[in-house]
Amino acid sequence: MNPKIQKLRAELAKNKGKISELQAKNRELEKQIRELEDTDIIGMVREQGMSMEQFAELFRKMQNTQPPDHYDKEEPRYEEN
């Protein structure tokens, strides 16, 4: 077999291993970020003295709320004189 092909296959296998390791590292980082965000959210809820039921109700209301009208309107156009 062509030695160049063997070299390229070895490099490809090495790269696939690195990619796999980086993907696993990214999954772990995403998990840690999510856990810290969850902890922050719980802390904010507790600072406000809300029960989990009150927070759940607030969150449901937020999900059902329509965005303000000004997001849908065009920017006003000004004419130069």
Image: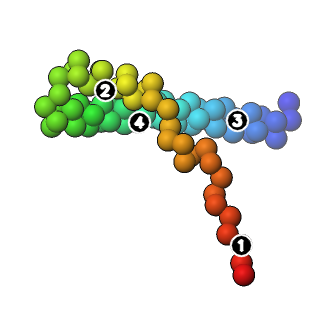
Identity of the amino acid at label 2?
A: Leu
Where 77 falls versus 13 (above or below)? below
At a point 26% along the width and 37% down the height, the residue shown is: 40
Could you give the CA–CA distance between mark 1 and mark 3, rounded to whole angstroms? Answer: 60 Å
Considering the image in quadrants, where does the N terminus appear? top right
At a point 59% along the width and 35% down the height, the residue shown is: 19
Q: Earlier in the sequence, mark 3 or mark 2?
A: 3
Q: Earlier in the sequence, mark 2 or mark 1?
A: 2
Q: Which mark is residue 29?
A: 4
**Residue 58's quadrant in the figure?**
top left
Towards the viewer: 25 or 35: 35
According to the image, label 1 marks what residue? 79
Q: Nearer the viewer, mark 1 or mark 3?
A: 1
Could you give the CA–CA distance between mark 4 and mark 2, rounded to whole angstroms? Answer: 29 Å
Q: Earlier in the sequence, mark 3 or mark 4?
A: 3
**Residue 59's quadrant in the figure?**
top left
At a point 69% along the width and 39% down the height, the residue shown is: 11
Could you give the CA–CA distance between mark 3 and mark 2, rounded to whole angstroms? Answer: 51 Å
Where 16 falls versus 78 (above or below)? above
At a point 76% along the width and 39% down the height, the residue shown is: 8
Query: In x, y percent, where is residue 77?
Result: 68, 64
Q: Secondary structure at mark 1?
A: loop
